[in-house]
Image: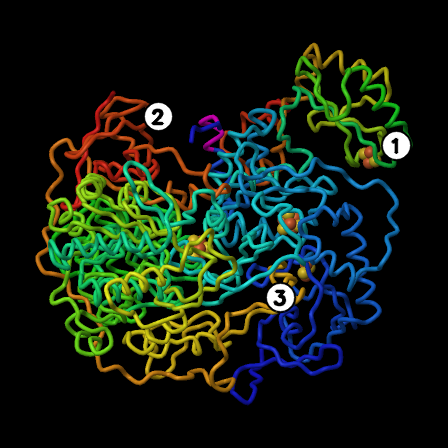
């Protein structure tokens, strides 16, 4: 098998596997790692994860497709998620979704042609106090109305929010609790510094 | 748990189910305990051969606990002392109805166009445990139907109830999770990895156990309705595992095979080759009428004319060259009765002992018959299993499943194999050796020799030896599975290896693992030189048998290879081919081709047109799988019954009838008029088969067959466990029975009273059975020549044999030939994987793409046998079977 993880990430992956008595347990963390590297889970990554976890690609695929935060199809550089659960719905989430769809020219679940934006609906993100709640690459952003949404999209497109909104990567919890080799270089640390 | 015991002294647990006191074994699942007590709980995900998961909630019952009665899934709950269970209370019924209503929300209810309709657990349980009406009026989910998730599996996602039986089978039993439940909520679906079809050798089992019509097979789809099916229980005669199956037919054609839960053998599973191989029965290439070569063409003739022509040729051969001028090859696909009739014709009427069911593609017959045998159950319960075989998943697939499970349950496997096999991940140790070195490896393994076998890793050998030392001195608990690891490695060296282990561990037992369906039965029936029916030698059995058979050949005849060689040398002029095609079956193609060309007359007795039938002068069509009664013997020596379900095509006859009619043309009578008469004669005259008659085999306790020789004192051979009554485990079997076509075992009547486990148990026989001692000093293989690679010729499941080629479900699965080498060889040759190389031996050369297998020792080249039609040149063209091992040279093209 040709390695898909970069050498650095392969080392992190092996460290992750070593954390658990059963290597399968590392499956979801490894999916996050692959996603931090590529933005999504390509077939090669899932195959390498299967090999690392001692399972099969079908089981990695089965698990990955269960979770909304794991993408088995290519997504845009920025994944914009709008919560449409009750608090946000009451605060105008659907209007915001419609606006977003018009603005980006894609429907929920789709990616813009330039590969910049993917639009998603999300379930409650625990940001009900700032409803309607919006995330970009799993980071909260303030974009609750059409005007601030448009401003957000403009700035993202110009790359102005790099500090606030890093590339894909959802490893923060694992890094926080156990640390990973090379964590300094991780998106989260970069974002903080 | 406090040790409560019943009168027999076994620990028991007492519980109450619906007010009735029930005894259960500690640890038993409630759903099983209830079933034994006659309370069948509704279920979907639970399958008696899979781990319970509690996914469907259909088996909810009320169970007493500290907080009063609560609903719990019976398939996840182990029985406990004093447990009180209510399975049909209002609360339990309501829960079950609720679950069913939920399951039906997204179910399309397209029963009229669903294969499962009429045998569907969802239909049945909706009727018995459902609410009768649904409150769901919204739109159901819609999917494209059906999609192909593998070459033999169609999935209708609308019908799937997400029970996970198919995915759990793939992961737990087959050990290859090529499918899993993907996505979530109402988007959930069974899915292979994108771009990787579900092409497991065992994929058909998922269709068999799917409790709804979500999984269907292209072979059976829309072929029949359960109420139009008839069925018999019989034995799969595709390989030598001998899985128990029901063969189902509709309008006189076989349409489906389902695995029967035979505890000692296949535990309800089948491989896809066995499951779909029946398609070959109805192929357009079946021989339907006798033909005789006239001029350049074969012309259909009457049986009378064909038999006269065959008899004339045989008479002519005997007149010119004596009885030894006749050679008979093949017969490993016949039933025991057919094989017995042909052995009797050969040895008592034609007077030739040059008869061999093997074409140099197995092991010396004396080794197969003369080593103390193990059953599959014994192998699965051994402490150490040593394998001297090829890849069992390719050769005896369900035996692989049993050994894989055994390994997971703690059996330690020492695998002696040049290349990694499907069993390697489960083996405690793999000892890779250079072909030709297996006997030396076995000697080193048991500590009999100090000489270090070439190619074997020191550390692995030391570790395996430590494991062997953990056995007691006699080797109690050691089972050796012995087959033919490579067709380019002589059977004699493998037999010698087995014998080395036996010498060191006299209490070891051996499970022969030859591949062809009834090769073990054919050898038992005397279709081998120097042997008579019932595992006795010509010498030992002569006196006892000649009273019934008449004069027997004076001395042992030639084996398969020698028959071919003698034909080339003009010492044998006439060949009878019993369903075999030497061009495809014999590892030494050059020898086989020369022999067929040289023979004056070839008589082909078989089921299909093959390369060999085309080269024969007389072709006699006979009944095949699903068309004949009788018995067959599997690798353990288990004799089980065959049942006919359909008629042979055209005017084909049972093979034993052909032997009988030929005998008549020599003024002799074989002395039987029906299969049952042959069975009784075998039970009377064949020492190892003493007492194994239709009455014994028809006894309900012997549904799974009996292992021969019957022990003087009945021993537990498995198979007495009553078949599970769970109609949902394999939905297609019981529903057909329910339609009034009972599962029949032929005409046999139960003999002896119920509980009499040994009706007609035989007295000890006076004739000693053969024991194996290898001819000493079999020439060891030389060192490989300079620059040469040692050749390994492996088998694969879907080889281009008649059965696969004639079964539409399987024919397209034959892999492309390639030569496999260790990555180091690529560097040496300076070629890229996939590029074409010339593989040259002293015999012939082939051009093949090169591929990598890093489990191979350097200096080994691996080819797969029979990937080209028998008229073409395949791996066997390279093999020189007169040598213990074959060397090849690789060259860049
Ligand atoms: S396809 Fe059949 S066996 Fe597999 S999960 Fe669906 S219902 Fe169960
Ligand atoms: S393992 Fe052998 S006997 Fe069993 S189903 Fe497959 S071919 Fe038939
Ligand atoms: S409902 Fe939208 S964040 Fe909670
Ligand atoms: S939950 Fe018990 S049978 Fe499915």
Could you say where residue B459 lies in the image, as x and y percent from the top left? Answer: 24, 49
Tell me the quadrant of ligand 4.
Answer: bottom right
Marks 2/3: CA–CA distance: 54 Å
Q: Chain of mark 2?
A: B
| Residue B760 or residue B668, whichever sits in front | B668
B183 vs B317: above or below = above
The residue range painted magenta reads A6-11
Number of residues whose C-alpha sits closer than 10 Å to that of mark 1, classed few (under 14), some (14–19) or many (20 or more): some
Judged by its main secondary structure, the magenta piece is helix
Q: Chain of mark 1?
A: A
The residue positioned 30% from the left and 46% from the top of the image is B581
Q: Quadrant of residue B851?
A: top left
Task: Give the left or right position of residue B504, taking residue B690 as reference.
Answer: left
User: Sequence order check: which comes first, mark 2 or mark 3?
Assistant: 3
Could you say where residue B340 lies in the image, as x and y percent from the top left? Answer: 31, 66
Residue closest to the eye, B466 or B690: B690
Quarter of the picture holding the N terminus of chain B = bottom right
Marks 1/3: CA–CA distance: 61 Å
Using residue A98 as the reference point, say whether residue B813 is left or right of it: left
Query: Looking at the rendering, which quadrant does residue B34 occupy?
Result: bottom right
- The residue tagged 1 is A89
The quadrant in which residue B208 appears is bottom right
Q: Residue at x 41, y 43 (%)?
A: B798
> Circle 2 sits on which residue?
B834
Q: Which residue is mark 3?
A: B741
Q: Does residue A10 show up magenta in the picture?
A: yes
Judged by depth in the image, the label closer to the viewer, 2 or 1, is: 2
Q: Residue at x 15, y 47 (%)?
A: B567
SS assignment at label 2:
loop
Residue B73 place in picture, x, y as percent? 70, 63
Asked if ligand 2 lies within 8 A of label 3, the reply is no
Q: Secondary structure at mark 3?
A: loop
């Amino acid at each position: 098998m040709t390695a898909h993880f970069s050498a650095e990430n392969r080392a992190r992956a092996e460290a992750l596997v070593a954390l658990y008595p059963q290597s399968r347990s590392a499956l979801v963390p490894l999916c996050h790692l692959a996603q931090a590297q590529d933005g999504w889970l390509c077939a090669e990554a899932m195959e390498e994860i299967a090999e690392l976890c001692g399972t099969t690609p079908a089981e990695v695929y089965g698990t990955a497709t269960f979770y909304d935060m794991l993408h088995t199809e290519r997504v845009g550089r920025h994944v914009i998620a709008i919560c449409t659960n009750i608090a946000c719905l009451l605060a105008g989430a659907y209007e915001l979704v419609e606006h977003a769809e018009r603005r980006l020219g894609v429907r929920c679940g789709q990616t813009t042609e330039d590969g910049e934006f993917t639009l998603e609906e999300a379930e409650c993100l625990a940001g009900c106090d700032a409803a309607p709640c919006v995330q970009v690459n799993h980071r909260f952003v303030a974009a609750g109305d059409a005007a601030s949404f448009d401003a957000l999209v403009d700035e993202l497109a110009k790359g102005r929010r790099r500090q606030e909104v890093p590339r894909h990567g959802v490893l923060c919890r694992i890094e926080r609790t156990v640390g990973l080799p090379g964590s300094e270089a991780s998106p989260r640390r970069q974002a903080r510094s | 748990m406090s040790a409560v015991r019943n009168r027999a002294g076994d620990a028991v647990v007492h519980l109450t189910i619906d007010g009735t006191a029930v005894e259960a074994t500690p640890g038993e699942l409630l759903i099983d305990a209830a079933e034994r007590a006659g309370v069948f709980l509704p279920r979907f995900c639970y399958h008696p051969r899979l781990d319970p998961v509690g996914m469907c909630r259909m088996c909810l019952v009320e169970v007493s606990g500290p907080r009063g009665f609560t609903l719990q899934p019976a398939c996840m709950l182990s029985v406990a002392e004093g447990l009180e269970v209510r399975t049909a209370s209002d609360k339990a019924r309501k829960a079950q109805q609720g679950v069913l209503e939920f399951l039906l929300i997204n179910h399309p209810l397209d029963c009229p166009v669903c294969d499962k309709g009429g045998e569907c657990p969802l239909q049945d349980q909706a009727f018995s445990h459902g609410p009768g009406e649904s409150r769901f009026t919204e739109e159901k989910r819609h999917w494209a139907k059906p999609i192909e998730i593998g070459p033999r599996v169609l999935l209708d996602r609308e019908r799937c109830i997400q029970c996970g039986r198919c995915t759990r089978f793939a992961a737990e039993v087959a050990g290859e999770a090529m499918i899993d439940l993907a996505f979530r909520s109402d988007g959930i679906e069974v899915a292979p990895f994108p771009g990787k079809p579900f092409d497991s050798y065992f994929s058909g089992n998922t269709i068999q156990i799917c409790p709804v019509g979500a999984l269907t097979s292209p072979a059976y789809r829309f072929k029949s309705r359960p109420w139009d099916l008839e069925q018999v229980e019989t034995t799969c005669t595709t390989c030598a595992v001998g899985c128990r199956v029901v063969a189902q037919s509709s309008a006189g054609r076989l349409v489906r095979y389902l695995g029967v839960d035979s505890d000692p053998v296949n535990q309800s599973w089948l491989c896809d080759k066995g499951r779909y191989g029946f398609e070959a029965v109805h192929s357009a290439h079946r021989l339907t009428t006798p033909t005789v070569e006239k001029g350049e063409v074969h012309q259909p003739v009457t049986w009378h004319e064909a038999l006269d022509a065959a008899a004339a040729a045989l008479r002519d051969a005997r007149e010119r060259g004596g009885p030894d001028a006749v050679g008979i090859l093949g017969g490993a696909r016949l039933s025991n009765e057919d094989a017995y009739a042909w052995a009797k014709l050969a040895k008592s009427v034609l007077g030739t002992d040059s008869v061999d069911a093997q074409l140099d593609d197995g092991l010396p017959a004396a080794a197969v018959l003369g080593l103390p045998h193990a059953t599959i159950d014994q192998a699965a319960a051994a402490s150490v299993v040593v394998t001297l075989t090829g890849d069992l998943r390719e050769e005896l697939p369900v035996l692989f499943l049993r050994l894989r499970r055994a390994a997971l349950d703690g059996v330690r496997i020492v695998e002696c194999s040049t290349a990694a096999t499907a069993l390697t991940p489960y083996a405690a140790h793999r000892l890779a050796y250079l072909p030709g070195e297996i006997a030396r490896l076995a000697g080193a393994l048991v500590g009999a020799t100090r000489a270090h076998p070439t190619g074997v890793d020191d550390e692995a050998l030391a570790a395996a030896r430590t494991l062997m030392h953990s056995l007691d001195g006699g080797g109690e608990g050691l089972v050796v599975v012995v087959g033919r690891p490579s067709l380019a490695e002589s059977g004699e060296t493998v037999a010698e290896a087995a014998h080395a282990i036996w010498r060191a561990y006299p209490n070891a037992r051996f499970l022969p693992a030859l591949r062809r369906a009834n090769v073990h039965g054919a050898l038992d029936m005397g279709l081998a030189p120097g042997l008579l029916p019932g595992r006795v030698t010509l010498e030992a059995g002569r006196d006892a048998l000649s009273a019934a058979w008449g004069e027997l050949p004076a001395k042992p005849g030639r084996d398969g290879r020698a028959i071919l060689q003698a034909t080339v040398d003009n010492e044998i002029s006439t060949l009878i081919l019993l369903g075999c095609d030497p061009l495809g079956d014999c590892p030494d193609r050059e020898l086989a081709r020369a022999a067929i060309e040289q023979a004056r007359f070839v008589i082909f007795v078989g089921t299909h047109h093959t390369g060999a039938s085309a080269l024969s002068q007389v072709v006699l069509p006979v009944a095949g799988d699903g068309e004949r009664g009788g018995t067959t013997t599997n690798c353990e020596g288990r004799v089980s019954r065959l049942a006919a379900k359909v008629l042979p095509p055209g005017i084909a006859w049972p093979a034993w009838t052909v032997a009988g009619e030929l005998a008549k043309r020599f003024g002799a009578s074989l002395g039987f008029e029906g299969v049952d008469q042959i069975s009784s004669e075998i039970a009377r005259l064949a020492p190892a088969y003493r007492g194994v008659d239709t009455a014994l085999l028809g006894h309900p306790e012997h549904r799974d067959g009996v292992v021969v020789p019957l022990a003087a004192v009945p021993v537990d051979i498995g198979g007495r466990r009553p078949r599970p009554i769970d109609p949902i485990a394999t939905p297609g079997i019981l529903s057909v029975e329910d339609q009034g076509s009972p599962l029949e075992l032929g005409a046999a009547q139960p003999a002896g009273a119920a509980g009499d486990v040994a009706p007609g148990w035989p007295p000890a026989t006076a004739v000693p059975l053969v024991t194996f001692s290898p001819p000493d000093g079999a020439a060891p293989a030389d060192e490989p020549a300079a620059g040469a690679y040692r050749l390994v010729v492996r088998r694969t499941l879907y080889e281009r044999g008649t059965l696969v080629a004639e079964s539409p479900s399987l024919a397209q699965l034959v892999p492309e030939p390639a030569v496999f080498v260790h990555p180091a060889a690529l560097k040496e040759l300076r070629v890229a994987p996939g590029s074409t190389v010339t593989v040259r031996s002293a015999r012939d050369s082939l051009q093949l793409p090169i591929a990598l297998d890093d489990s191979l020792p350097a200096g080994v080249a691996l080819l797969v046998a029979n990937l080209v039609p028998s008229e073409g040149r395949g791996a066997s063209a390279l093999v020189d079977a007169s040598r213990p091992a074959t060397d090849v040279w690789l060259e860049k093209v």
